[in-house]
Amino acid sequence: MLPWLVVALGLCAQLGTALPPRRMDTVLQMVEALEAAEELSLPELARALGSCSTPGCLAVLGDPPAAPPDLPALSPEQRALLTHLLRPDPAVPERGAVLAPDGSTVALAPLLAGVEVGLRMAGGWPGPTPEPPAALDALYAVTLTEALGMAFLLAHAHNHSGATLGPSGCWDDVENPQNFTLLGPPSPVPEAVANGALDGVLLGARLAKGPVPLAPLLRSYYGTDNGTASGRPPSSYRRRDFGALTGLKKLEEEVVAMLRLLRVLPPTRGLLEDVGEEEEGAIARRAARDFMETFVECPAIVPRCMWGARPYRGTPKPLSLPLGSVYIHHTFVPSAPCRTFAACARAMRSMQRFHQDTRGWDDIGYSFVVGSDGYLYQGRGWHWVGAHTRGHNTKGYGVGYVGNFSATLPDPDAIALVRDSLLPCAVRAGRLRHDYALRGHRQVVNTSCPGDSLFQEIRTWRGFQ
Ligand SMILES: *[C@@H]1O[C@H](CO)[C@@H](O)[C@H](O)[C@H]1NC(C)=O
Ligand SMILES: *[C@@H]1O[C@H](CO)[C@@H](O)[C@H](O)[C@H]1NC(C)=O
Ligand SMILES: *[C@@H]1O[C@H](CO)[C@@H](O)[C@H](O)[C@H]1NC(C)=O
Ligand SMILES: *[C@@H]1O[C@H](CO)[C@@H](O)[C@H](O)[C@H]1NC(C)=O
Ligand SMILES: *[C@@H]1O[C@H](CO)[C@@H](O)[C@H](O)[C@H]1NC(C)=O
């Protein structure tokens, strides 16, 4: 074992739970300390610690640099945390993840590998040597397509018996995040890894265009400028921006190129021995399509445990899917749109308290709530009957915009989030009938909800009746 690693691991055990919070700004502090000391950059250090030790990543980026014997720029706690986050463990790909200010969880390994490729490309790097068997874009190879290709290759070998993508997860404490727990069966590409890959591609592509200092770039991307999020940072647009940068076809081609590389690398060669060219194409098509659907076309939904939901009271009643209706609401109170994770989470908790304690309902009434921070928040979710539209709760989902939209409209992004993302995604997933009816709350109950302005807006949406 490398001496530096021994020291760091020893400290880890000794420090117990006193590690710095697993937040993006903790990582940014380390990037800055390393930059100031002109030591290895964080992406290089990550590789020295083993964060790019899969066959494909090694083939593209080459042998890692030697781990430095000492890193005086970092405190012992920072070193211990880094070692813990970046030590590879294929069984727990989400372990090296941190919480970003927008409430998303981001795996560092794919993020830092993408950043390293971007920095190298800006410096005129000619690409991997020896050249891989198929033209391959290094940016996608180190961030996404190896994990994605392997996931679907193994699923193919095992007759698609396990999960290949997802799930999301939750932190023990969003103020001082230490433990991250997945919300469902593990897969090789949980949402945290997908987020790290999307960010690695977007930031790597930005860096490749011309060198900019890393720390300010990351600070503005994640919105950690002064430690507190004040609005929507670019990270909250990662799905939209990745979709604009990378079409389905491009992603599919990059997965094929990765499978061709894995076919000639000794550690993975055997896996592809019995996979013909046609099968290879089918695996790549499926991988690219499922990835785009799950992490680009469908919206991110903040799970209940992330906004601090209380438990449901009593026993929830299941919906029978697919549903035929959607009812659009505004919350009225809170009357201001929420524009940060912290503000939206607070709004969710206060609505749940009101619905449970004052109204006497089992839970927050809405199926989903729409923030103006780029995220949907899970209320009762896809599977349980809500309390949003009297007399119609078993027939449709209730989707509520945080804010008072009597005289103003939600932001265009918040409109598009439901109209162009949530609803088409619900149809594709078989949760909503393709001929669903969309209505404003006021069409079925005597109320002004969802406000005159928002009601005029939804009259133009697909399915409005
Ligand atoms: C996959 O299915 C095929 C035929 O349906 C079967 O022969 C094979 O044993 C299965 N493989 C695994 C790993 O379950
Ligand atoms: C976090 O995880 C560690 C190790 O798995 C465990 O010992 C500790 O109790 C957990 N802390 C919380 C708050 O769940
Ligand atoms: C820091 O963030 C707050 C919002 O939380 C904002 O009002 C303030 O202008 C920011 N300060 C600087 C110097 O960017
Ligand atoms: C909602 O907006 C309308 C129109 O601007 C205003 O008259 C009303 O007082 C607002 N209600 C609340 C609760 O903010
Ligand atoms: C609808 O509600 C308003 C105000 O609460 C009331 O004046 C009106 O009579 C109600 N209309 C019907 C049809 O119940």
Image (tube, rainbow, N blue to C red):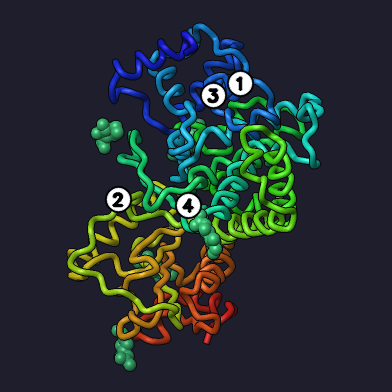
Along the line of sight, which residue is nearer the eye, 420 or 248?
248
Distance between the Cα atoms at labels 1 and 2? 37 Å
Along the line of sight, which residue is nearer the eye, 184 or 336?
184
Label 4 sits on residue: 166
Q: Residue at x 58, y 35 (%)?
A: 111
Label 2 sits on residue: 308
Label 3 sits on residue: 50
Sequence-wise first label, 1 or 3: 1
| Quarter holding residue 435 | bottom right
Mark 3 and mark 4 in contact (Cβ < 8 Å)?
no
Nearer to us: label 1 or label 2: 1
| Residue type, numbered disc 1 | Glu
Instruction: Kindly state the secondary structure of the residue where label 4 is placed.
Output: loop
Distance between the Cα atoms at labels 1 and 3? 10 Å
Sequence-wise first label, 1 or 4: 1
Nearer to us: label 1 or label 3: 3
Q: Does the beta carbon of the residue at mark 3 sit less than 8 Å from ligand 2?
A: no
Q: Position of residue 409 (x, y in %)?
A: 52, 67
Distance between the Cα atoms at labels 3 and 2? 35 Å
Sequence-wise first label, 4 or 3: 3
Instruction: Kindly state the secondary structure of the residue where label 3 is placed.
Output: loop
Q: Position of residue 115 (x, y in %)?
A: 64, 31
Mark 2 and mark 3 in contact (Cβ < 8 Å)?
no
